[in-house]
Amino acid sequence: VRWSNFLTWRIVPTESLVVTSTTYLQPALTDFGDFRALENLRLSASVTETLALTVSFDLRYDSRPPDGLAALDTRLRTGVTYTY
């Protein structure tokens, strides 16, 4: 059984830039040394009113991963968002 906590924030420093983050921390209730952490960080920069460039970074960490799996896993994605 795990205790699930999360924190989400969003910053809009300019009209054309949005930064969003969601962080999860999931410790085991019987052993706080056994935990999982997840992070999603996203930057979105408007090019036009309907088009934006995005960069997303995902991080997953498990302090006690199953055999054969790495404790840390990351992913970086880039993309284009069209809003109509």
Image (spheres, rainbow, N blue to C red):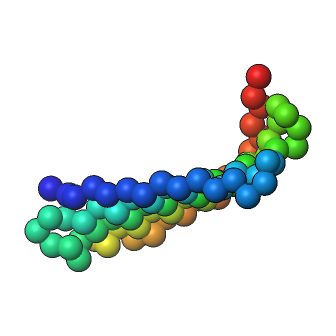
| Occupied quadrant, residue 5 | bottom left
Do we see residue 33 in this rendering? Answer: yes
Foreground pick, 75 / 1: 1
Q: Residue furthest bottom?
A: 33
Residue drawn where x is 59% and y is 53% of the image? 10
| Residue 45 coordinates in the image, percent (x, y) | 79, 49
Residue drawn where x is 85% and y is 34% of the image? 49
Residue drawn where x is 14% and y is 64% of the image? 29
Q: How many marks on residues?
A: 0
Position of residue 61 in the picture relative to residue 59 (left or right)? left
| Occupied quadrant, residue 7 | bottom left
Q: Is residue 84 above or below residue 15?
A: above
Q: Is residue 66 above or below residue 10?
A: below
Foreground pick, 68 / 83: 83
Foreground pick, 46 / 27: 46
Quarter of the C terminus within the rendering: top right
Quarter of the N terminus within the rendering: bottom left
| Residue 79 coordinates in the image, percent (x, y) | 74, 45
| Residue 24 coordinates in the image, percent (x, y) | 39, 58
| Residue 42 coordinates in the image, percent (x, y) | 63, 54
Residue drawn where x is 82% and y is 44% of the image? 46
Position of residue 57 in the picture relative to residue 71 (left or right)? right
Q: Residue furthest right?
A: 48
Do we see residue 69 in this rendering? Answer: no
Q: Is residue 25 above or below residue 77?
A: below
| Occupied quadrant, residue 33 | bottom left
Position of residue 5 in the picture relative to residue 17 (left or right)? left
Q: Residue furthest left?
A: 30
